Image (cartoon, coloured by chain):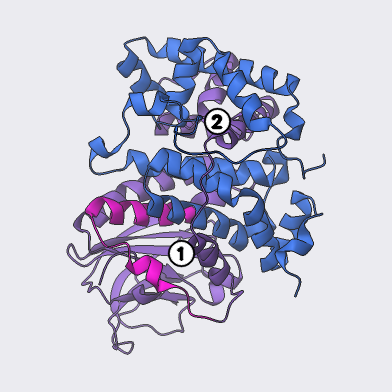
Chain colours: A blue, B purple
Amino acid sequence: MLGPKAYRGQQDSQLVALVAEGDAAALEALYDRYGKAAYSLALRVLAVGTLAEEVVREVFLSLWRDARRFDPSRGTVGTYLLSMTHHSSVDVVRLQENPRRRQGPEEALALAIEPPADVEEEFEPSGRRGRVRAALAELPEAQREALMLAYFGGYTQREIASLVGIPLETVRTRMAAGMRRLKDELREAGRQEQFPWTRR
Amino acid sequence: MDSPVNHSDYEELAAGFALGALEPDEEQAFQGHLEGCPACKASVREFEEVTASLALATVRVQPPASLRAAVRSRTGLTLRRRAARTIRSWRGTRTTVRAVAVAGVLAVLALSLWNLALRDQHQIDQARVAALQEAVRVVNDGTANRVALTGSAADSGARATVLASSLQDRGVLVVEGLPPPPPGRVYELWAVPAGGASNPAKAIAFRFSDRQGVHAVRFSVNIQPTTGFAITEEPGPGGSRSPTTEPVLAGNPQQSRPGGA
């Protein structure tokens, strides 16, 4: 059987097709590509390593079980893995028995995207992480706040409205505007390079 | 929330949807809308690419080797027994057990949330919310088990997970993709005592008219920490007092138990 390294040249969609045929090494190749990002995201939201492991493991295994039913018109498999990881993590956070375990807004807003001072982040040749951070930094503060509270803090729009003391409609508007602006900026900055191994 | 009356209301929800920031009822309404709206589907697809970028912008943390091992062992790449070490090490607070069990429930539903074209999204969302709410209630004691069921029906695409509380003698079955039984017949969930496979207790009889939906079935039955579960097909409408057929799905807590011994 080929090891995961043999799959390096394959596009994500080809790997999904192989997983659908029961090729476990293809799933491992997808784990090589997205496992670290998924785990980092889950850990950022959940703050507990064992929970993050559980969520990420189950997301990959959901693909293993059901790859035949994967709908590519909904999005790429990379987006699926990260979206489902985020979705599951946020749901788990919201059902925590002890609400104080959930991170407060300061933590959610705290540079989730900058490494702590004592951590040297690995060099990333494509620079896309830097581009996303730059794009986020360029958002108006109110929009960035809404996005970060939601995405990293797992707060709903209603909770943010209550937290910040603004109408729900204002939260919706800020979120929509912030996302549209990020979309445009990332497109400008070469969004297509996010997943360098995916040729569209 | 009030139902959006203008399409622009839905457009505004798309960003919140991609960020996971909608309330459950809003999310249900939006997903219901999504299936029939190519424009919103395209918006969601674009916004999810943006959120994927946010994910990629986080500080990268190397996952522990146990995570890769857990994925590999479940796919059967190795002949070794699954590393129960990792699962056993998760002794601890109620919150941890609950969240772990909930994550398991979500995993059952993950692709249902993704594939819009296949099924009634509203029903899925309702089932998901109900299953999560029940999961939270059932797992309140810290001794609850999550039991994954496998078997012949799984080969045809059925998925089932039982969350069982031995403290409360109650549980919830989350099941998806099980074909409807023949007319006049039902499925039945059994609680199987450890070492007592010949003496299962009836948990509940159920039947659904659609194969494609996700269903959460609540039940009450005597449950021990070692109790397994099985689903058989039985005569309707109320099922049998003892199983009359071989299980289509079955599982034991030793294989998938999140709590400590």
Where's residue B90, x and y in %?
A: 32, 62
- Location of residue B201 by image quarter: bottom left
Q: What residue type is labelled 2?
A: Ala
Q: Are marks 2 and 1 on the same chain?
A: yes
Q: Magenta segment range?
A: B80-108
Q: Main secondary structure of the magenta part?
A: helix
Q: What residue is rendered at 36% in x and 58% in y?
A: B217
Looking at this view, is A193 or B207 the one in front? A193
- Location of residue A100 by image quarter: top left
**Magenta-drawn stretch contains A80:** no
Secondary structure at numbered mark 1: strand
Q: In this view, does A190 lie to the left or right of B6?
A: right
Q: What residue is rendered at 58% in x and 77% in y?
A: B78
Q: What residue is rendered at 50% in x and 12% in y?
A: A173
Question: Of callouts 2 and 1, which one flags the residue occurring earlier in the amino acid sequence?
Answer: 2
Kindly tell me whether residue B179 is visible in this rendering: no
Secondary structure at numbered mark 2: helix
Q: What residue type is labelled 1?
A: Ala
Where's residue A95, x and y in %?
A: 31, 42
Q: What residue is rendered at 36% in x and 40% in y?
A: A93
Instruction: Report which residue position mark 2 lands on.
Output: B18
Instruction: Report which residue position mark 1 lands on.
Output: B160
Where's residue B232, x and y in %?
A: 43, 76
Instruction: Give the class, few, some or many, for how many residues have Cα within 10 Å of label 1's Cα (few <14, many ≥20).
Output: many
Query: The residue marked by circle 1 belongs to what chain?
Result: B
B127 is higher (above) or lower (below) than B37 = below
